[in-house]
Amino acid sequence: MQELIEQLYYVVHNPLVTPAQLVNNAKLPEYQRISFEKHEDGLAATMEYLWEGNAVEFKYYFDAQDHLQKAISIDLKANTVEVIFDRTVEINELESRFVSNRSAKQSIAI
């Protein structure tokens, strides 16, 4: 139970990835380009990465405090999109697990 609380706290309060970290990653040879633009109340970053000869685009969405809210990958060759992180979904899943564990422990105690 304590571990779930710590995980939830971490996801709620940590930036996880910041725009500055993405800029540092752009210096690596696999990255082809990076761009930033304003998005709602924060920033959106787009990075193109060369993986096994295929170009993959990563999009990162940050809030006004530079906390990562969502990240997706787009395989440009296969034209497939995958959500690799969604803060809202992560928080909801952790909260559900916490409530389920708490309910299970309460039913055992009865």
Image: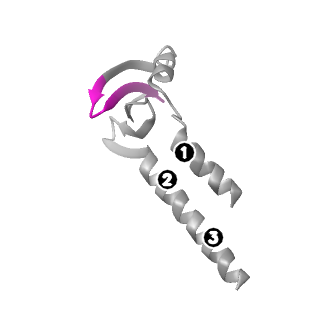
Closest to the observer, 41 or 38: 41
Query: Which residue is label 1 attached to?
Result: 11
The secondary structure type at the circle numbered 3 is helix
Marks 1/3: CA distance? 20 Å
Q: Give the percent coordinates (x, y) of residue 87.
A: 45, 46
Asked whether 106 falls inside the magenta stretch, the response is: no
Q: Earlier in the sequence, mark 3 or mark 2?
A: 2
**Residue at screen point 66% across, 78% down:** 106
Tag of residue 91? 2
Q: Is residue 22 above or below residue 5?
A: above
Q: Is residue 8 left or right of residue 106?
A: left
Count of all numbered marks drawn on residues in the image:
3
Type of residue at label 3?
Arg
Write down the residue under mark 3: 102
- The range drawn in magenta is 37-53
Please tell me whether the stretch drawn in magenta is mainly helix, strand or loop.
Answer: strand
Locate residue 26, reporting x and y percent. 46, 17
